[in-house]
Amino acid sequence: MSNLDQQLERLLRSASAASRPAESAAELPFPAQARVLAAWRASRAEGGDLFGLIRCFRLGLACACAVAMIAIGASWHGVQSETADEMILSNARADVAMLQ
């Protein structure tokens, strides 16, 4: 057995011989839990989200989506009007050809 294995074996034996804490001492009473949760919520509301960066990113994302939708609408309108102009031009050429 190597020196490392002996040390590990000794550590595990001493850990198994150690006394265990009482189970009831690990749980906080309800009023203490309520105070801790209230303090956590208050600190979070005061600016715990990195000085409002998350809120700023959400607003930026909403504005970017709105700008993208406006750009799509404008380009769609341009595509529709160009298609109509092309059809009018081709129909006019056909009408002129029929007249001659």
Image (cartoon, rainbow, N blue to C red):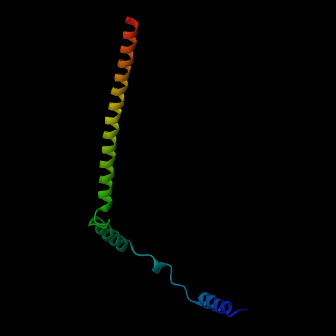
Q: Is 71 above or below relative to 30?
A: above
In the rendering, at what x and y percent does residue 33 appear? Answer: 37, 72
Q: Could you say which is closer to the camera, residue 74 or residue 44?
A: 74
Identify the residue shown where x is 32% and y is 57%.
57
Q: Is 58 above or below relative to 15?
A: above
Using the rendered view, name the quadrant where residue 72 is placed: top left
Identify the residue shown where x is 59% and y is 88%.
15
Q: Could you say which is closer to the camera, residue 16 or residue 96?
A: 96
Identify the residue shown where x is 31% and y is 62%.
53
Q: Could you say which is closer to the camera, residue 14 or residue 79?
A: 79
Q: Is 75 above or below relative to 90?
A: below
In the rendering, at what x and y percent does residue 32 appear? Answer: 35, 74
Give the number of callouts: 0
Q: Could you say which is closer to the camera, residue 44 or residue 29?
A: 44
In the rendering, at what x and y percent does residue 1 appear? Answer: 73, 92
Using the rendered view, name the quadrant where residue 20 is placed: bottom right
On-image quarter of the C terminus: top left
Left or right: 76 as drawn, with respect to 21? left
In the rendering, at what x and y percent does residue 10 appear? Answer: 64, 92
